[in-house]
Image (tube, rainbow, N blue to C red):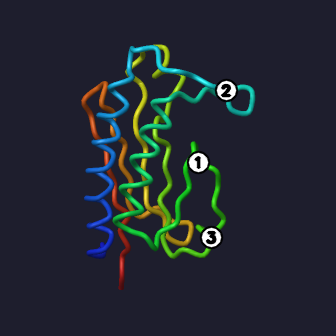
Amino acid sequence: MVISAETHEDLALLRDAAREAGTIAMRYFGQNPQVWMKGGTSPVSEADHAADAYLRETLLKARPNYGWLSEETADDHARLSARRTFVVDPIDGTRGFLDGLHSWCVSVAVVEDGRSLAGVLECPAKRETYWALAVEERA
């Protein structure tokens, strides 16, 4: 099984960034953050925007050649020409977050050619972190 050094470094970056984004989101948790509706049916809060802004700045500063795809950011089709892309949901489970449930997380991943290579779910309200790396078997 093979995991590149670059993918290991990406995972470390994702873990650190997701942890801090979770800390940012927790500042709003249970505090009645401002909420807007996107698409008429899906809530987005100022916590989503704050965590998203932090993740975008931090991740793209560290990896400026990577693409960016986030649930809370307008799509930039330039990501389609990037070798690797960050895929982000700054608060996965916004409705639960707004209802004071602990069932939300910060979700971040790195994708290459449509294949997930590394991902992190940071669940600060539960004090849990999950992460994964894709491996390749070589003959």
Quarter of the image where the N terminus is located: bottom left
| Residue 121 pos. (x, y %) | 37, 42
| CA neighbours of label 2 inside 10 A, class few (<14), some (14 to 19), many (20+) | few
| CA neighbours of label 1 inside 10 A, class few (<14), some (14 to 19), many (20+) | some
Residue that badge 2 annotates = 37
Quote the CA–CA distance across marks 1 and 3. Answer: 15 Å
Label located before the other in sequence (2 or 1): 2
Residue type, label 2: Met
Question: In the displayed structure, would residue 52 be above or below residue 83?
Answer: above
Quote the CA–CA distance across marks 3 and 2. Answer: 28 Å
Q: Residue at x 33, y 69 (%)?
A: 7
In terms of image quadrants, where is residue 23?
A: top left
Residue that badge 1 annotates = 73
Helix, strand or loop at mark 2: strand
Label located before the other in sequence (3 or 2): 2
Toward the bottom, the furthest residue is 139
